[in-house]
Amino acid sequence: MRTSNRRSSLLLGATAPMLLLAGCAASPAIERADDARSSAHRNGAPTAESAPFAQPPSEDSALAAAPKGEAEMQQGPSRSAEPPRAGNSGAEYSGKSTYDEAAPAARAPSAADSDYRAENRARGAGSAYKSAPSPIAPKKDVRPGLGTTWGETRTSHVSQVSFERQSSNNPSAVFQINYNDDQGILAQTGERSLNNFEPNYTESSGRFVSVEIVDPGGSPLLGLSRSDRTYVVGRDGDRYAIRIRNHDRQRFEVVASVDGLDVIDGSKAGFGKRGYILEPYGTLLIEGFRRSSSAIASFRFGSVADSYAGRTGSDRHVGVIGVAMFGERYNEPVYTDGEIDRRETADPFPGQYARPPHPRRGYDLQ
């Protein structure tokens, strides 16, 4: 992994307080804001359209997104001979009608057939022309609990700014937030009920930044903190967002992941990805996977099978949200807390009264 410091350009987006995103030198980062001016490009930076963004899961057919009952009705007998396609569970294609075309066509039995049938009946083997059972497509293991689906498209404009990390792969703080439905969270935490759960809130050791998982109205979801991990209770179908607040005077780059996928490009998450920039004392709201420089796909709780991670690769890391914070490198002298305190406590009149001169040293000449 690269350990050298890097410089990157960032994107600025809409629908939330100001955000910034940073990444590799060749990959622009993103900053978000809640006004129309955020679509303008800063300092002549390249447009955000040249940067890679998350791609929607492939749609094999209209049946993929349809409810199970509706999918079965749309399929009908005319599709019975079609083998299961990649991305489908195969349940709609199971049953004897799946491969009926492979069965022999009906014909009138001959005399030899009659003798053969009689012989088999005597042996208790039944009819020689009994159709073999149709093969059933293997069913994929169904995981319980929640994942994050590729939700509806929402407007979110971005533009690019520049940012340089203090360290490329050593974040100042890392947050891990596990989410699941109520039964799943109780099983993970060992709690018997949600009575001890409170609105989730996680902050760094230095309390310079905090993270919350919130509903569309901005209210934190119920959660429980255990050592360095937070558990959050979600509900199937609900939309959610990641809210990050900066309590410090410096900017940070925020690299975020959902279900092991980067929220910007939708691929496997890592510290080397671009990130949103969080302004001093600002608030960042990450509401979905970024589809383009002007749109996101909302985060929505759903089944593991329907999750974006499960439909695009692997559901191994479903159920976890990650947030990594990177401080900014300054080329000019940095005003530390100690230096600022010295200046704030400087006394314009340190000597209120005249002091006598220092006693003369040595001997006077006669």
Image: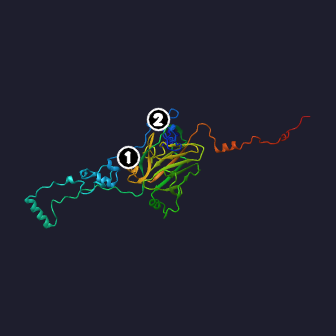
Name the disc covering residue 57, or none: 1
Residue pointed to by mark 2: 47
| Residue 122 appearing in the image | yes
Say what secondary structure mark 1 lies in.
loop
Q: Tell me the kind of residue under disc 2.
A: Thr
The front one of 138 and 154 is: 154
Callout 2 environment at 10 Å: few (<14), some (14 to 19), or many (20+)? some
Query: Which residue in the rendered view is the most extreme toward the right?
Result: 366
Which quadrant does the C terminus fall into? top right
Q: Do the residues labelled 2 and 1 touch (CB within 8 Å)?
A: no
Q: Where is residue 56 in the image (x, y as percent from the top left)?
A: 39, 45
Q: Quadrant of residue 126?
A: bottom left
Q: Which amino acid does label 1 sit on?
A: Pro
Q: Residue at x 44, y 59 (%)?
A: 184
Q: Position of residue 262 (x, y in %)?
A: 45, 46
Q: Which residue lies furthest to the top in this view?
A: 44
Residue 45 vertical placement versus 271 (above, below): above
Is 345 on the left or on the right of 124, as rendered? right
Q: Nearer the viewer, residue 259 or 97?
A: 97
Residue 330, position as x, y percentages in the image: 58, 39
Q: Residue furthest left?
A: 111
Of the image marks 2 and 1, the number of the one nearer the N terminus? 2
Crowding near the residue tagged with mark 1, few <14, some 14–19, many ≥20 C-alpha atoms within 10 Å:
some
